[in-house]
Amino acid sequence: EADIYQTPRYLVIGTGKKITLECSQTMGHDKMYWYQQDPGMELHLIHYSYGVNSTEKGDLSSESTVSRIRTEHFPLTLESARPSHTSQYLCASSEDEGEWTEAFFGQGTRLTVV
Amino acid sequence: AQTVTQSQPEMSVQEAETVTLSCTYDTSESNYYLFWYKQPPSRQMILVIRQEAYKQQNATENRFSVNFQKAAKSFSLKISDSQLGDTAMYFCAFSGDNYGQNFVFGPGTRLSVLP
């Protein structure tokens, strides 16, 4: 059973506010990912990490930033939220390469910027 | 770079019938992993089934099975005895066998199971 948690599940916030979306996993996975997904649409990788102090930008340009100070924690921050940031944000983690590698997903954070 | 294509944006099937979702991919690697993920409306993305490229036998999980054609780079998902709870977005995904490779997801197929 996947043990990856995202908070909050839903967030409505005003333009210009700073927000942090939390993601934690208890599986000890080195690899973690943030995806942006408009409802019912495809996933876009915006950030990933291969371990502590490792962060990289993904395929889709994003104004957000991430940090990886602890293995289990991979928060995503928007310094100044805008309506264009309205979307669903999915966090995922996976083991290092090896047999039966798969991605485990959190429940997502649905962000609305008004 | 690897790509994953799902040519069916939307599909529907009657309850208890069988449906096949298509997925093709492009890679130059000899070993890799393929996945089908399910995302029900407003719910968590979960793994449905996975296949390792070097295993010729098609994976099966209860009502879900795949048709893996390595030479054709095709990885279709068959859902037998469709149930209302199968209504969801289905994403085909690829993962290489080398460290430093991320998952590549297809654009998804929206499946509706009709009563």
Image (cartoon, rainbow, N blue to C red):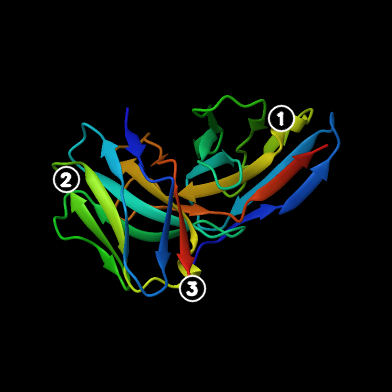
Distance CA(mark 2)–CA(mark 3): 35 Å
Q: Residues within 10 Å of mark 1 (few under 14, many from 20)?
A: few
Q: Which mark is residue B9?
A: none
Front-most of residues A70 and A109: A109
**Identity of the amino acid at label 1?**
Ser
Where residue A12 sits: x, y (%)? 81, 45
Q: Nearer the viewer, residue A34 or B72?
A: B72
Question: Residue B56's spot in the image, x, y percent?
Answer: 13, 55
Residue A109 in view: yes
Query: As drawn, is A6 to the left or to the right of B33?
Result: right
In the rendered picture of this protein, how many numbered marks are placed on residues?
3
Pointer 3 chain: B
Placement of A47 over or under A91, stated as above or below: above
**Tag shown at residue B70:** 2
Would you say the residues marked 2 and 3 are in contact, meaning their CB atoms lie under 8 Å apart?
no
| Residue at (62% x, 58% y) in the render | B42
